[in-house]
Image (spheres, rainbow, N blue to C red):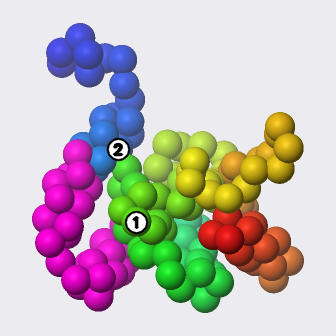
Amino acid sequence: MADHEKNFTAEERDAMKAAAAEKRTARSRAKKSPEEVRAEGETDIKAAIEKLTAADQAIATGLHELVSEVAPELVPRTYYGMPAWGRDGKVLCFFQPASKFKTRYGTFGFEQQANLDDGTLWPTAYAVLELTPENREFLAERIRHAVS
């Protein structure tokens, strides 16, 4: 193993490989219609969800349904191999499954382009253990705000 590989976990190396593949995919999609990009993104996100544990699959599927319902203008895609949704070729929100990095909980997070600014302090990620109706409504409001 090379020295630089010792600095990263296997999960981190896998995520970096996924990101490199996503960049290649993004370049090829730049020449495609929005409909083709959305269809391919749907395929990618469903494939990413299928690789998850059952618990993470349930949350990721629920989040995909929620984002598609609340912000249909966001295009499904992957982000470091994780389910994500974006616009203008950039990720707006994503689900980091607990199983991906062997953590206690998965997180639903937002990237820089999300319109979440509120003074000088605001949350950009939420731990998700279960997608209850209350959690769905809370996240729906955050998503609506983020895309506004």
Q: Is residue 17 above or below residue 73?
A: above
Labelled disc at residue 88: 1
**Residue in the picture at 62% in, 57% down:** 114
Q: Residue 77 at what x, y percent from top left?
A: 38, 68
Classify residue 142 as left or right of residue 85: right
Neighbours of disc 2 within 10 Å: few (<14), some (14-19), many (20+): some
Q: Is residue 131 visible?
A: no
Question: What residue is drawn where x is 23% and y is 61%?
Answer: 26
Residue 5 percent across, percent down from the top left: 26, 21
Q: Is residue 98 magenta?
A: no
Residue 13, compared with residue 98, is above or below; it is: above
Q: Is residue 145 visible?
A: yes
Q: Is residue 71 left or right of residue 39?
A: right
Q: Magenta residues, as a range?
A: 20-48
**Residues packed near mark 1 inside 10 Å, few (<14), some (14 to 19) or many (20 plus):** few
Q: Which x, y percent locates residue 2?
A: 18, 15
> Disc 1 marks which amino acid?
Asp
Q: Position of residue 69 (x, y in %)?
A: 61, 88
Residue labelled with disc 2: 15
> Which residue is located at x 14 percent, y 65 percent?
28
